[in-house]
């Protein structure tokens, strides 16, 4: 899949749409989700044009990979969720319900989040 430069995260990166920033450096931008699913819900996106986690893992330079995941950690700390716990979520592709075709990591916290998924057969 080719990268769509009109996706909402690309537009946020270009400053065309506002975002409530949590953290930013040369590799990533972290901001609050506009439709939070937990008391704390942040998003972290790389500054490069990557459609999905698979695309990012295959094509990003080592410095981008390391810088991005350090930014995820810094954003979690700034969100105040590192002591009590948090969840990272990456949706990759249609079956995982990836809504925006720009790789992104969700950071959830601020309450007990329960089990990740129902057990098979539940």
Image (cartoon, rainbow, N blue to C red):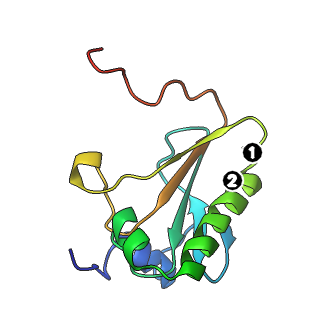
Pointer 1 with pointer 2, Cβ within 8 A: yes
Any mark on residue 76, and which?
2
Name the residue at the top extreme: 122
In the rendered structure, the answer to whether residue 87 lies left or right of residue 59 reads: right
Question: x, y percentage for residue 68?
Answer: 59, 70
Q: From the viewer's perspective, is residue 106 above or below residue 50?
A: above
Indicate the secondary structure of the residue bearing disc 1.
loop
Mark 1 to mark 2 CA distance (whole Å): 6 Å
The residue at the point 39 percent across, 63 percent down is 53
Any mark on residue 37, and which?
none
Nearest to the observer: residue 45 or residue 57? 57
Q: Is residue 52 visible?
A: no
The residue at the point 46 percent across, 79 percent down is 60
The residue at the point 65 percent across, 30 percent down is 111
Question: x, y percentage for residue 35?
Answer: 47, 48
Question: x, y percentage for residue 11?
Answer: 42, 79
In the rendered structure, the answer to whether residue 18 lies left or right of residue 84 reads: left
In the rendered structure, the answer to whether residue 12 lies left or right of residue 107 reads: left
Residue carrying label 1: 82
Q: Give residue 92's quadrant in the image.
A: bottom left
Indicate the secondary structure of the residue bearing disc 2.
helix
Q: Give residue 38's quadrant in the image.
A: top right
Report the quarter where the N terminus lies. Answer: bottom left
User: Local crowd at mark 2 within 10 Å, few (<14), some, or many (≥20)?
Assistant: many
Question: x, y percentage for residue 109?
Answer: 63, 39
Question: Does label 1 or label 2 sit earlier along the sequence?
Answer: 2
Nearest to the observer: residue 86 or residue 61? 61
User: Local crowd at mark 1 within 10 Å, few (<14), some, or many (≥20)?
Assistant: some
The residue at the point 30 percent across, 14 percent down is 122
């Amino acid at each position: 899949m080719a990268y769509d430069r009109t996706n909402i995260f690309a537009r946020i990166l270009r400053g065309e749409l506002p975002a409530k920033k949590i953290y930013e450096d040369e590799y990533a931008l972290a901001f609050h989700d506009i439709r939070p699913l937990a008391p704390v819900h942040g998003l972290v996106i790389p500054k490069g044009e990557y459609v999905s986690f698979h695309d990012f893992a295959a094509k990003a330079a080592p410095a981008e990979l390391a810088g991005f995941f350090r930014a995820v950690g810094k954003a979690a700390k700034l969100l105040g969720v590192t002591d009590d716990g948090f969840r990272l979520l990456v949706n990759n592709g249609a079956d995982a319900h990836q809504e925006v075709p720009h790789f992104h990591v969700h950071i959830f916290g601020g309450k007990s989040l329960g089990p990740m998924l129902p057990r098979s057969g539940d």
